[in-house]
Image (tube, rainbow, N blue to C red):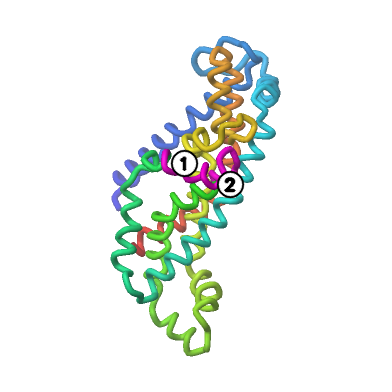
Amino acid sequence: MSLTDRLTGRALIALFCAGVLIPFAALVLTALNPPGTAVSGIGLPKDPTLAAFGDAWSAAGFGALLTNSVFIVVGVVPLALVCATLAGYAFATMDFRGKGPLFALLLVGLTLPYEAAVVPLYYNMQSLGLTDTPYALIFALVGLYMPFGAFWMRQQFASLPKELREAAALDGAGEWTMLWRVLVPCIRPGLTTLGLLYFLWAWNQFLLTLILIQTPGERTAPAGLAFFVGAHSTDVPMLAAATLIVIGPVVLVYLFFQRNFIAGMVSGAVKG
């Protein structure tokens, strides 16, 4: 690679980093202003304070909203990962009647916007008596994430050498042992990446939350933020503080798992 190519690559990386960091820095600086302060442009606040965070936390009730979001994420991610792993393993390693058509039908779910399923989902959950509960959102999200999860995990399992399964079978390993003790450890980066994607999608879910959960106190943090914005549209520091409160867990989780996420994405791209 020539010096010009290296400089061009670094310049592009610096440009992309600036495009992400500058808006985030502006959000932080705005939130450090006293509540009610008129803010225009990016600049250091004259009297930095964390008062906007405290006011936003109490006004929106973020304590309960964040707890609801955590409950839903903890319910969605493990269950969706287990279902996707089982489906991906079956489609990648087993031969059964209707395998091709069933997988094609599953892939159709990747082409359909989830907005098209909102109305049927609402009436299905209502018939089960689950509307206005977090379980309605958990079950709905697990089902909606299955097409991508099954496809992703199928690619991960299909990329492993057949000799690995044959050796495990010769050692007397059954299907269950082969799956969880032999194959899953080999695809851990891809599984971690899928789990992070599930976390991001479940945490940021907005439309289904508004439809399936009507009680304000039972909604998630992003949904609560939307109503908070409508009630405090003129208080820019409080809006910035509330936004940081909601996106904070996402940023922290990504920073903690970023190496695994990147490794899984690169692994999936190479294997695909």
Q: Amino acid at mark 1?
A: Tyr
Magenta span main SS: helix
At a point 66% along the width and 15% down the height, the residue shown is 34
Q: Is residue 254 visible?
A: no
Q: Secondary structure at mark 1?
A: helix
Where, by quadrant of the figure, is residue 30 drawn?
Answer: top right
Disc 2: which residue:
135
Question: Given the image, on which type of amino acid does mark 2 rest?
Answer: Tyr
Where on the picture, by quarter, is residue 162?
bottom left
**Residue 117 place in picture, x, y as percent:** 40, 43
- Read off the residue under disc 1: 123
Q: Nearer the viewer, residue 18 or 75?
A: 75
In this rendering, is residue 90 above or below 81? below
The image shows residue 137 at horizontal and vertical percentages of: 53, 44
Going by the image, does 216 lie left or right of 17? right
Q: Position of residue 198 (x, y in %)?
A: 50, 50
Q: Nearer the viewer, residue 124 or 215?
A: 124
Residue contact at pointers 2 and 1, CB within 8 angstroms? no
Magenta extent: 119-137
What is the CA distance from the residue labelled 2 to the residue labelled 1?
Answer: 14 Å
Of the pair 222 and 1, the residue shown nearer to us: 222
Mark 2 and mark 1 lie on one chain; the one further toward the N terminus is: 1
Q: Is residue 144 visible?
A: yes
The quadrant holding residue 4 is top left
Query: Is 126 left or right of 68, judged from the image as shown?
Result: left
* Tag count: 2
- Residue drawn at 35 percent across, 75 percent down: 96
State yes or no: residue 130 in magenta. yes
Taking the spot 48% from the left edge, 55% from the top edge, the residue there is 193
Q: Nearer the viewer, residue 250 or 63?
A: 63
- What secondary structure is marked by label 2? helix
